[in-house]
Image: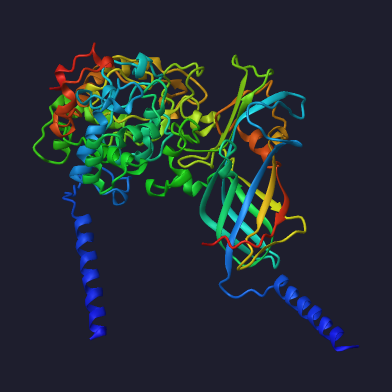
Amino acid sequence: MFKHKKVLISLCISAYLAISAFQISNIQRTFFKPEIPSNFPPPVYELKANPLTEEGIELGRTLFYDPILSSDGSTSCGSCHQQFAAFAHQDHPMSHGVDNQFGRRNALPLFNLLFSKTFFWDGGVHSLDFSPLNALENEVELNEQLDNVLKKLNDSEEYRDKFKKAFGVSEITSKVFLQSLTQFMATLVSANSRYDKFIRNEGGLLTAEEKEGLELFEQKCSSCHATGLFTDGSFRNNGVPNNYRFDKGREEITLNASDRGKYKVPSLRNIEFTAPYMHDGSISSLEKVLDHYTSGVEQSATLDPLLKQNNQPGLAITDPEKKKIIAFLMTLSDREFITDKRFSEPELFLNTPKPNEKNHSHTNNR
Amino acid sequence: MNSFKIALLGLLWMTLLFSCDSAAETISPGDKNNMIIEFDQYVGNEKLVLNSKTYKNTAGEDFTISTLNFFVSNIALKKSDGTEVTFPDQYFLVRQADAASLKLTLKDVPAADYTSVRYTIGVDSLKSVSDLSQRKGVLDPASYGNDNMYWSWNSGYIFFKIEGSSPLSSDPAKVFMYHVGGYGGYTGKTPNNLRTITADFGGNTATVRKDISPTVHIITDAGQVFSAGLRISTTSMIHSPAAAKPVADGYVNMFKVDHVHNDKHDHKE
């Protein structure tokens, strides 16, 4: 009898544990599987370590647009990464953060980050999870400290509730904070341009000029702007004039003089929306970018060998060819991506005035 | 010999027997206890006092210290028989401003006689690139407040940080800041400033027993930061792995075991 009682008690305990475990794992989370485009290489980010959920993504989106992440409440990630500009900063060679201070490099667009091995122009960050920290702590960007952000978030009942729903935690830690931002950024997949629909045989059509542009692109540009991502992720010096006094590029990370002036090859997807161009935002139009590659490439010790032909810096591209290449580049615009409501600023922030953005029109965002 | 004397001798014998027994105390399998490694921080022969005290380096440069922090990891204890006990996945951040952080407690050290300790100053490359779930305790970038020990622009920990002031600094505010990091690189080879320190107990042994929890006192001499030729007058700011090599090459010389207490403390609850 005694023995049976024991069994009964332990049965009750295990049943209780099973139910509570079920409740914990069943805090109404909906798992989300990001679509991996068939014309893309496999993802780099380990989604197993941070499984995406609708709740985590939504929370990440809220954080992305919340200026609570900056020291003076003026600037959010979305201030410099604008959806209508494919999450680059339109018309800004350099972006400005708190106190209207300017950075020294052009904000990179944010998309297809799951497929990236390194982050930022110099590749100083090698995990998507740690990439927000760079902007968060940079004095001219959000000028904040991670512990202070966590304090502000933990002080907010609303955020505590959101984190509980998304991660089942009662305290907001660096881990879940960064994981939620990653979850949102992971969903920023851009692969529905007209070119994609053409290459995947989904009914997209290219004109004769665009097709010729594609051929020229493959001959002249695709060794660096490679794969379905339109970048090989490497670091190269593309001959943009640089006296290296304020910016040594990749050398600042590897501390190797052979990396002087090298920057990550940017994707050309959505290039129509991400002007100005180059790491320093020094070139305002695609026509001028192509002019740079034919006649503006500056010779230097670290200039990429692919940009030297017959010992002369620069590529041989005729003016009619440039026109065709640009026509092709326009087919890389993904309008679904830049208008997708899932990536837009949540309603709750739309009516909050932001000091830093008062001079900026967002009309083409909506 | 009368019976009294015999009894007295017997008692003496018994006492000797017992005391010998407890000194050589047999080790039963599974016996363990804590070992404490305590950093006694100095500059030369003077105790390290933050901000208020002025010191001189080997080049005769006056300086004060406002911050001295370093990571200690991958601790290994060497037994008298030459074998080692390692403590993987234990990371400590020593901060002069936080007295409690100067004592590192190694838990569940197997009972034995230990003759030296080896450790890394910094955070090894594997941990430096590990995923978010491993960034706990002193490895959590949110744990540093104003006293940051993580480079967000060039992902990695600041292994060692010394800051202070000197009239010889070329900085307008007359401060110097040496931040050392660099674990060898992830996507490309970068300088490696991880340094391994071996501190011999100098003939002493730290005897860990079921009821003995020793404390190893390591004397640190922050002045040794300058022992590889670094000068405040020529270098007041170091914030990158390549530039930090002379600092790391200097501080490898700053750790010496001073003495060992084999206190009869049962540190376990």
Instruction: Please identify the residue farthest to the right as the structure is shown.
Output: B1
The residue drawn where x is 36% and y is 30% is A265
Report the label total: 0
The residue drawn where x is 31% and y is 37% is A154
Q: Nearer the viewer, residue A200 or B236?
A: B236
Instruction: Please identify the residue farthest to the top as the structure is shown.
Output: A359
Q: Nearer the viewer, residue A195 or B178?
A: B178
Q: Is residue A121 visible?
A: no
> Residue A20: x and y, percent?
22, 60
> Residue B130: x and y, percent?
43, 47
> Residue B33: x and y, percent?
58, 63
Q: Is residue A318 left or right of residue B86?
A: left
Q: Is residue A197 left or right of residue B17?
A: left
Q: Is residue B69 left or right of residue A130?
A: right
Q: Nearer the viewer, residue A120 or B7?
A: B7
Q: Is residue B78 visible?
A: yes
